[in-house]
Image (cartoon, grey):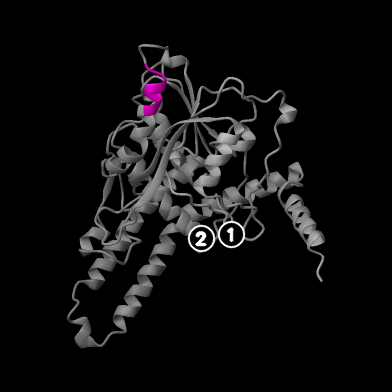
Amino acid sequence: MADGTGEAAAKRSYFHKERIKCSPEEEARLEREHFWRIIDAFSYYRVHVQEQVRRAEHQYESLPQKHRKLLPNVLAHLAQISRCAEKNQELLQAIVHNSLHMFENIEYGQRKIRPSSTFDMDKLKSTIKQFVRDWSEDGRAERDSCYRPIIQEIQRLFPRHQCDVSKVSVLVPGAGLGRLAWEIARLGYMCQGNEWSFFMLFSSNFVLNRCDQVNSLTLYPWIHQFSNNKKSSDQTRPVSFPDVNPQSLPPNADFSMAAGDFVEVYRESNSWDCVTTCGSVCPLLYHFENMANELSVELSYEEIRTAVSTIGFHIEVEKESVQTTYTENPRSMLRYVYDCVFFVARKPADVYYHSPEDIQPAVKSPRRDGEGTQT
């Protein structure tokens, strides 16, 4: 009979070794390699799309001539996709240029651009669609379904007629491209967004700090979708952004973005009046599920709710069926609708940590190379 106890201990030791025992030098190396891997993805985008287009052209040319005559516009459409990819690449290169020195006191050196993995290209394509969700008129309906309930609850809990909202601190983990945090700051609250993904950090830094004219930039976010198009023109439809001027916050607005892993950056208890995230209106998607060498415990909402209550939080608002979409192409013939949970939990005054030593260290996940690494 196998020694199950020994095997379990060995697995725990493996995860501890892989995820925590990294020297500062090793962490810096992993961070540098990860940084350049994301730069590679942004820079390799055009080549990636052109390879897709060439495959489509080859498949079309392999058809019998009598069939090709039935489809006279295919090659012209593929050429248009290539031109749209060129335009997207121009914007992505502007983001790269703006990102190389975005972190103070940190330099990642220089190196030649390398081909990017399919995994990272998929992440980049998703990031392109985030511009639509967060900073375009096309994304307004999706923002209204996700962000508006959060903002309304903040205004209910911290109303202007009862408190100085400029002194109410709001933290937004998983801030993405920053629109939710920006909207909260626009209402006068002191707000900080937190993000770990370089894809999101590069893009949010660009839109928040380099865009100052409404709808001055254009992306073609749907050119990667070759299926479920009613019209060919739907695939090459442009989207303009930003729909508002990100520089138009009031002069006294207190808004910032912080880079890093949430559980590592924010260790001091009782520092924020409100912590909010669009994760409170979302399906339970676990990014590290089934990934090699990644520790992931997938919980049901029931289990999460029980843990929240057991810690001592009081659930004040709970809506178990909030339907929404995520970076949806409104003209696609295939759409995903998520049946989400929205909740508000209050931390009572008597729920606190006595000292920093009472806080158990979070499992640390250094950035790694490879297609299996989430950002």
Residue type, numbered disc 1? Gly
Report the residue at 34% width, 56% height from top: 336
State which quadrant residue 316 falls in.
top left
Q: Which residue is mark 1?
A: 372
Report the residue at 55% width, 60% height from top: 114
Look at the magenta stretch and give its main secondary structure. Answer: helix
From the top left corner, tell me how far across and down residue 323 is, in percent: 33, 47
| Circle 2 Cα neighbour tier, 10 Å, few/some/many (<14 / 14–19 / ≥20) | some
Report the residue at 61% width, 33% height from top: 311
Above or below residue 308? Residue 170 is above
From the top left corner, tell me how far across and down residue 112 is, in percent: 57, 55
State which quadrant residue 73 falls in.
bottom left
Report the residue at 28% width, 67% height from top: 78
Of label 1 and label 2, which has the lower sequence position? Answer: 2
Pick the quarter of the image with the N terminus. bottom right
State which quadrant residue 350 falls in.
top right
In the depicted view, which residue is nearer to us: 168 or 61? 168
Q: Secondary structure at mark 2?
A: helix
Contact between labelled residues 2 and 1, with CB atoms less than 8 Å apart: yes
The question of residue 322 being in magenta is answered with: no
Q: Which residues are magenta?
A: 153-159
Q: Which mark is residue 119?
A: 2
Residue type, numbered disc 2? Phe
Judge left or right: residue 15 versus residue 266: right
In the depicted view, which residue is nearer to us: 269 or 346? 346
